[in-house]
Amino acid sequence: MGEFEQIQTRKAISAYGGVGSIFETRDGAIMIQPFDKWPFFQKVESHFQDHNFIEDKRFKNRISKYFKNLEYLVKVPVNDLMFGYKLTDGFSLLSARYFPEWFYCNSCKKFDKFPNWKYNWDNNVDTNDKDKFFPPKCHKCYKSKSKKGKWYDLEQVRFILTAPNGDMVDIPWDKWAMLKKAQKENKESEEESEITLGNIFVPKDIELSYHTSNKLDDLKGIGISAKNSKGEQLNYSTLSGLFSLRMRIEELIPNTPKKDILFKPVIRTSNSVYYPNILSSIYLPSADELNENTINQIKDAFEDGENATQIKKNLKRYKFIDIEVNTIQKLIDNNFSERDVEISKTENEYRHNEYKFVTSRDEEKIPDLLIFEKIDTSFFQSELIKSIYKMDKIKITSVQTSFTRQEPISSDLFLKDDSEITETKEKIKKKFTSTYGVNTKYLPAVESFGEGIFFEFDNEKLKKWLKENPQVTSRISTIIENHLESESSLNKELKVTPKFILIHTFSHLIIKELEYLAGYPATSIQERLYIDNELKMQGVLIYTVAGSEGSYGGLTSICDNEKIGNLIQSAIIRANDCATDPICYHTSGQGVGNLNLSACFNCTLLPETSCEMFNSFLDRRILIDNDYGYFRSINTVK
């Protein structure tokens, strides 16, 4: 790029600025490069120090099942940009490039690629001004006497091409500029259902200009003019029909070995441009007890004839080390390889360890890593919610393994081969965060400390509620059917149940209520769902992170008295008040793929960064309905 931009460290592993994303800055849109292209990675790859790594054995072992050569989870580098331009560290940097590469000048209308703009600036401006190109500026207007030496910033075109295999390229605007002429010569209709640019001839001396209309606000109001070097008009094409454009990869990238990959245009800020595949984990202190010394002790005990149960008992009695029996058995079964202990096949199996750790212990305190406790049941509606845990401090590690474009994929597919992704209209494939792909030795990670509230429901009470209210199952069947019929590859493996929708919707209502009570914007609060019938999980963690210092007790202080019960009741009551009722309340389906019922942005939906399910699988009515709502008993003001 030639200059520096500053983003929050945690956003380097997020939908805002992760590898492969388009990051909007004040000086233009940039695309974050693969992890191994970062100056930080290239500088210290062979000289990492301990402070560069994130220690979470349980998490690393799980990811290593797919990334066989993985050695470390590497912290995204921290840097400062002093005075807006001066770096405190010359190599702790991410790498990015301008994308889209096509820029135009709003003054003279010239339209060209970034490398050409930079070349012409370097060769046409005064020596003293050569280093003032960023943000990109127009050399043509700089030279014009009528402009009196004014510098005009360039603007990027809004449209790009994406493919289901994760590739993203610029639209060949020089070919589009000649489209109308080509259509006339080939006697093609401008209203063709599908447009291609593969065989369009582009003169070598073509010069483009980008025009916008003050009268038309659709794509017909945007046009690209093509002239030759003599200034003679060659053609003029509006952007009408742009979204009918389809181009094969061999038309865009000559001599490519790839085949049958079809690109389609999108706006560069569209959600479909980038879906990061981010895995996260809550640090469990017990996982770090499985160090080399402990493994050797387990191996010696096993060779002396002890079984897993006996080994656990003796470790706890004589060494004060508490390791689960099944963990010891896994270690024995895998020839005492720590790397192979974590054998969770699904995301829910992995989370089940966290769920058990929290709900099976009244309190666990590990300085600076994990502090939580079960709160008094008299503080909340214990007849509806089994337990609430005050999570004063939690450590959460997030790793971006890959990303997709056009459609998201289920979290269970993040650590699986593309062949296991459910077929869609166009095969969605993962794009890895490193050019080494699945063979990478490192993955970028962010370590965050925060606080949260863990809600655990009673499985037997949920079963009883469903048995006594069969209309709930009947109602939710609409979402289940829409989910099974959906062409999207998102969460195909997810088993949607009334219990899932109940707890997920409850989570959203609590997060929205925390905006009023705790003052946190919903964008800073996230959910972590623990819901699975087979594993008997029925809970949710609502948490916030705010850098290495945590979030200063704004959430957990609510758990110190009856405020938590008031929060729950207020959230349920507020769920009755939706600005789009009665339409929202009585809808038969809304949202993407009709995967929601009574849920819209006025009452239930959250910012995308807060919801794990992309604002799907929600229905507030099964919580508040006077006839069958789970929380109907507290759906009144006392």
Image (spheres, helix red, strand yellow):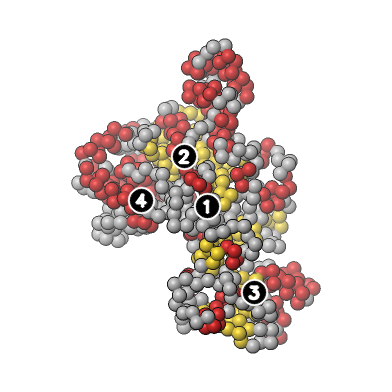
Q: CA distance from mark 4 to mark 1?
A: 21 Å
Name which of mark 1 and mark 3 comes first in the sequence: 3
Mark whose residue sits in front, 4 or 3: 4
Name which of mark 1 and mark 2 comes first in the sequence: 2
Q: Is residue 268 visible?
A: no
Toward the viewer: 255 or 51?
A: 255
Mark whose residue sits in front, 2 or 4: 4
Residue positioned most to the right: 127
Name which of mark 4 and mark 1 comes first in the sequence: 1
Name the residue carrying label 2: 347
Local crowd size for mark 4, using a 10 Å CA cut-off: few (<14), some (14–19), many (≥20): many
Name the residue carrying label 4: 483
- Quarter containing the N terminus: bottom right
Q: CA distance from mark 1 to mark 3?
A: 31 Å
Query: Which label was assigned to residue 382?
Result: none
Left or right: 138 with respect to 587?
Answer: right
Q: CA distance from mark 1 to mark 2?
A: 19 Å
Amino acid type of disc 3?
A: Asp
Q: Is residue 488 above or below residue 322?
A: below
Amino acid type of disc 1?
A: Lys
x and y percentages locating residue 294 in the rendered image: 59, 21
Identified at 51% across, 29% down, the residue is 365
Name the residue carrying label 1: 429
Q: Is residue 406 above or below residue 381?
A: below
Query: Which label was assigned to residue 112?
Result: 3
